[in-house]
Amino acid sequence: MAPYGQENGLRRIGYSVDDGWENDKIADQRLPLLPDADLKDKIVLLRVDHNVVKKGEILDQYRIDVTLPTLYNITERGGRPILMTHVGRPYDKKTKTITIRKDESVDAVVAYLQRKLRIKFVVPKFHYDEKDGILDIDTSINWLISDLRKRKIGGIYLPNTRWFAGEEDKGEKLERFVIQLAGLADVFVNDAFGSWQPHGSTYHITKYLPSYAGLCMQDELYHVEAVLNPTRPFVAIVAGSKYDTKIGPLNQIYKKVDKLVLGGVIYNTYLCAKYGVKIAGVQDSDIELAKELVEQDKTQGKIVEMGILVETDTLSGRFEGQYRTVNVKDFAPGKTYNYIVDIDPLSFESEDVLHALNSAKTIFVNAVMGFMPNFWHGTSRLDEVIDNNKSSKKYFGGGDTLQAFKSLHPVLYQAALDNTNYYLFTGGGTVLKVIEEGDTMGLETVKALIESKKNLQSENPNMVGK
């Protein structure tokens, strides 16, 4: 608590409250931060990661809520916001076409923001091609920008960025899209930590506007540093449906951790490579890739094996008589198993597993251990065991990870939001990408912000150091 009032000490009309927050958390001075931006009467293009819509409904509003401080900061300091996010994957790589579907629109997000903030947002309508999506930002948007400046509306929310032909393009369409996008605003703010791919609205836009990291982006980068340089012992729990897409970050994580727990198809693949068994759904090519990890672990012994698993005959549901537990101790070369879809909760009673999780000082979770929603018991028990370690710092990341956490333990999830021993990342895949790069500032989207600041300083030498 600090007095607030006249500096001569004659009057103190109030006091400010110490909230424990460090205003200057990001140590890297190269990164341009939102508080340093001049926003007064400026149109601010704000890229967020509100990719939380499935079939037209919001799955979890967390990724929206954590961007509200940035939105408030912009408006409180006189800026007028134009928001944008991607939703889903409307681009088909095989047919090379963009399909515009109502259930992949931003409407559900806009409705949530309006209910939450009691502020009116408007989504502009643009003409689109049935194969190429939205080709151009129509000049009719200038009417909305005029109303935005006059405060007739609280904000503009652009259509799904992946509906635009230029968003994921690499040629002329990209260039045209980004130039038109930059023409809408005076300043760009990136608050989309989870959107690390260098697309038009996350990366290329920084070449045309003064660009800054939003408050959510700053929080994520600050906390991912704790995963890159953890307090030890450091335990990571990683799962996934594909081994080949996780092999890069998995190899880097293995180097950094003291213990590693695997789940999902990743764990199944590892078991096939180690024990010579066959498990339904595991690709032979992935088994070959996993043999390198098996060889590493023979000497370093970092992988904590979950010994009791759940096997099922079908993925269509959890049917009595069609699933059973199997023990890794019984694995032998040539044995064949149906789908391994969960870690049995009894696995967490193992002395090795309990010791690893209870002794950890830093725990990173990017994992749903079972095939949801029917096989959830392993994930539920994992969350409980992790929470029992009260002295550790716990970092959860990934949409599926947070979704499972919230649905299985709603009370614990709510408590974690305000618990300094927990941090919930908006992008688990992004954390894995940072770990793979080995540098907090190594993401292409972050490097683009740094480059934007350098260019701005070279044009305005008086702002060096700001």
Image (cartoon, rainbow, N blue to C red):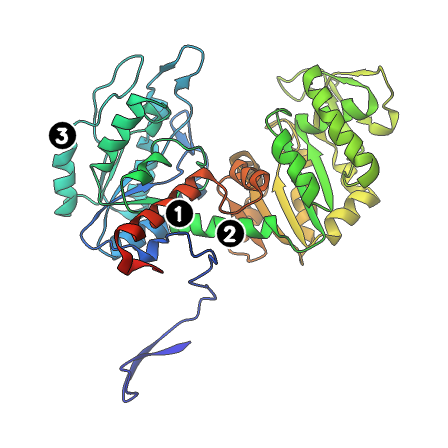
The circle drawn on residue 342 is none
Q: Which secondary structure lies at badge 3?
A: loop
The circle drawn on residue 140 is 3
Does residue 441 appear anywhere in the picture?
yes
Q: Do residues under tags 3 and 1 come within 8 Å of each other at their CB atoms?
A: no
Mark-to-mark CA distance, 3 and 1: 33 Å
Return the residue at label 2. Answer: 417
Pick whichever of labels 3 and 2 is earlier in the sequence: 3
How dense is the environment of label 2, judged by Cα within 10 Å: few (below 14), some, or many (20 and up)? few
Q: Residue furthest bottom?
A: 10
On screen, 154 above or below 283?
A: below
How dense is the environment of label 3, judged by Cα within 10 Å: few (below 14), some, or many (20 and up)? few
Name the one closer to the observer, 412 or 63.
Answer: 63
Q: Which secondary structure lies at badge 1?
A: helix
Q: Residue at x 74, y 37 (%)?
A: 345
Residue 142 rendering spot, x and y as whole percentages: 14, 35
Q: Do residues under tags 2 and 1 come within 8 Å of each other at their CB atoms?
A: no
Question: Hey, which quadrant is residue 94 in on the image?
Answer: top left
Q: Which secondary structure lies at badge 2?
A: loop
Name the one closer to the observer, 46 or 310.
Answer: 46
Amino acid at the residue labelled 1: Ile
Q: Nearer the viewer, mark 3 or mark 1?
A: 1
Return the residue at label 1. Answer: 450
Q: Is residue 357 left or right of residue 65?
A: right
Name the one closer to the observer, 327 or 261.
Answer: 261
Amino acid at the residue labelled 3: Ser
Residue 300 rendering spot, x and y as whole percentages: 80, 40
On screen, 356 above or below 376?
A: below
Residue 87 rendering spot, x and y as whole percentages: 39, 29
